[in-house]
Structure formats: structure tokens, C-alpha cells
Amino acid sequence: ILVIPQALGMQVEMIANEGPCFPQPLKTPEDLNTKIDRTRKASEELKYVYEAITLTRHTLDGQCPLIGFAGAPWTLMSYM
């Protein structure tokens, strides 16, 4: 789930015994304009994710579900 903020140009750090941390989190609506890199194309930045899902789905050949959980926008924003 944290690859999405990274694809938008946000820095994410994994802190031992704490978990994910954003050194510059979004705190105000204005932060969407200053902390998100709108020149980056998330679809291009996340291309490797799409390719991995496609490859895995084809390899599984319908034998079992691939995605058991997908974080919703609220979950993602709570991290950011």
C-alpha cells in the first residue's frame, strides 16, 4: 500500500519497532499541492506492480485467489 505515496514522490521510511513513517506527512489540504509531485505519472511509477500482479495471476491459473486485501483510500490517507 505504501508504494502509492512513493509513486507520488513522497518519502517513506521504515522505522524499527514503529513501522512506516513519513518525514513530511500531509497535514493540511494545501499539502496536496506542495508535497505531492504532480509531474510524476503514478501509472508509470507503479508499472512494475501491475506487471507482477499480471504475471502472478497467470501463473496461478485460477487455482487460488491472488489479492485477499486491498487498502482503501481512507487507509492510505491515514498513513500519509
Image (tube, rainbow, N blue to C red):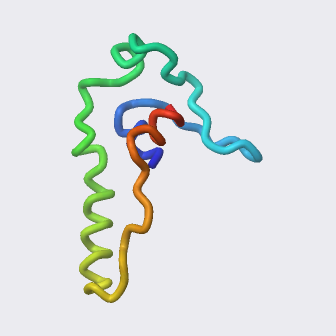
Task: Tell me where residue 18 appears, x and y as whole percent.
Answer: 72, 42
Q: Nearer the viewer, residue 31 or 39?
A: 31
- Name the image quarter holding residue 60: bottom left
Q: Nearer the viewer, residue 44 or 30?
A: 30
Q: Is residue 46 left or right of residue 22?
A: left
**How many numbered marks appear?**
0
Q: Nearer the viewer, residue 65 or 10?
A: 65
Q: Is residue 7 above or below residue 39?
A: below
Residue in view at x 26 percent, y 63 percent? 51
Q: Residue furthest right?
A: 17
Q: Is residue 15 above or below residue 68?
A: above
Q: Is residue 6 left or right of residue 49?
A: right
Task: Tell me where residue 57 appears, x and y as whole percent.
Answer: 28, 76
Residue in view at x 26 percent, y 53 percent? 47
Q: Is residue 72 left or right of residue 40?
A: right
Residue in view at x 38 percent, y 68 percent? 67
Task: Tell me where residue 9 appears, x and y as whole percent.
Answer: 39, 31
